[in-house]
Image (cartoon, coloured by chain):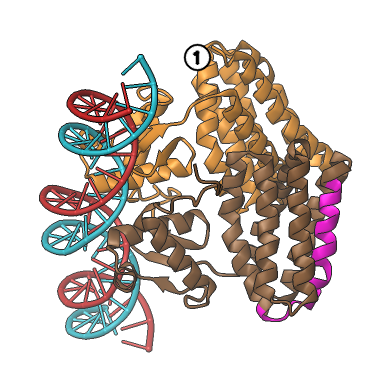
Chain colours: A orange, B brown, C red, D cyan
Amino acid sequence: MTGAPLPKAPRRGLAHEAATLVREAIFAGHFPPGSALREVDLAASLGVSRGSVREGLALLEREGLIHSAWHRGTTVIEVTAEDVEEVYGLRAALDRLASTTARANASTHELGELDALVDAMSSELAGQSSGPQLLALDIAFHDKIYDIAGNRRLTSAWHAVRSQLYLFQLRRVALGYEHYSARVVDEHRELVALLRSGPREVLAQRAEEHVDSARRSLLAHLPS
Amino acid sequence: MTGAPLPKAPRRGLAHEAATLVREAIFAGHFPPGSALREVDLAASLGVSRGSVREGLALLEREGLIHSAWHRGTTVIEVTAEDVEEVYGLRAALDRLASTTARANASTHELGELDALVDAMSSELAGQSSGPQLLALDIAFHDKIYDIAGNRRLTSAWHAVRSQLYLFQLRRVALGYEHYSARVVDEHRELVALLRSGPREVLAQRAEEHVDSARRSLLAHLPS
DNA sequence: TCATGTCCTAATGTTGACATTCGGACATGG
DNA sequence: CCATGTCCGAATGTCAACATTAGGACATGA
């Protein structure tokens, strides 16, 4: 009996490995938006067969990071204003439901974990703040809310936009994130306060506005 | 130049074919909830290779109809009260967004198409009404709303719950659908009226209530 | 009787070879 | 010069054989 919670046996198949590798390559900018992902090339560089690569790409398509057409290959999604509107519009609806559901389910312990995440953002901001690091905490915060909500279908839908969101935000962070970091701590702290003891309708409203603020901020920087 | 809109070239690969066949088999009750779907058996009965079956099953998993674990095979989802709560909770959030977005986008012609669908429900109900037929019209109505909204990510999320919803409703219809048919026409007609010229917030509220009414009605019949 | 350790089998996971399709380059005709 | 038809290459779609794994059956020992 190991005391550790669980190392989470990482046996999930080569397809997951391949998907993880390609996903990180996309985030690292190795495959810019619109570029083609050729199965044979990926299979060669990852050292696995085309079948596994193909299955991994299917997973990434599920996350909305790539798009594939019959006999025409798969390409990384573009980042147009329309795409941003779609992703953030959907995310607002999902966050609204996640927040109100989490408000009804959250234990004191879980609320404490959310506090800890906001504190981590705050200290990250105080020290030599790293944009991607702040982004990761932001995502982790919302992951936690979806986790508390406990609706597996909802979490699944969230995962289908999360990667795209991360890709969009990375682009903004690369251009400077003063505007982002100025609000991120306060907005999240307010969300926790409302989750703890806020009127349901106010929380729902604020959750939507939180997304909308991020959307506007991103669109302002989009034309690059 | 053919006058017809487009026969929509049905070349989408064997994986799609396999997915369609298995999906219909599940709906037809050939694979009850919880039953295992063995790749070799399916490949044999469908006359395609295991690779195609595997890819088709991945599509069905995307729709939430089946669930697969590593090296443990894939099984048809169960229909517990918790599952119903999850699906309908998410659907309410999606419908809320779809309705308000469609309200802003809808052309007169598109609103007319919605009217036509409600009329079709009405005449279906007047004649010798068939439950599954009524269900299909219900789904088509909401498909149209998502289509008008024009958010591809939102439509994708809708497709991820639509099949599950259909499976749940089929179960209810099999036990009699008087309660369902009594409300279906009026509720949909009211939605069209609100889409045409209703306050945004009232429409959002009604869209959620429409889903909630279906949820309660289903839960009442669930213990079978 | 119960707990434990070891096979064994039936299924999935993985692979490399073969078949099919798309889109463009080129030639041809108006 | 533009429209049309044909061909070709490169990539994806499909397949059947091989490797790996999970879970149960069985035997063993306390």
Above or below, B72 relative to A153: below
- Residue B119 visible within the image: yes
> Residue shown at 31%/68% (left/top)?
B43
Q: Name the side, left or right, on which B190 lies relative to B20.
A: right
Along the line of sight, which residue is nearer the eye, B91 or B155?
Answer: B155
Q: Is residue B154 above or below residue B27?
A: above
Residue B176 belongs to magenta span: yes
Residue B85 visible in the shown view: no
Magenta highlight range: B174-194
Q: Is residue B43 above or below residue A201?
A: below
Answer with the quarter of the image where residue A144 lies: top right
**Is A191 a magenta residue?**
no
Element carrying mark 1: helix
> Residue at the spot x=59%, y=19% of the render?
A123
- Judge from the rendering whether residue B200 lies leftward or rightward of residue A182; answer left or right: right
Give the quadrant of the N terminus of chain A.
bottom left
Residue at image position (54%, 71%) is B27
Instruction: Please name the residue that numbered disc 1 is placed on.
Output: A174
The image shows residue B3 at horizontal and vertical percentages of 55, 46
Q: Name the one closer to the observer, A101 or B194.
A: B194
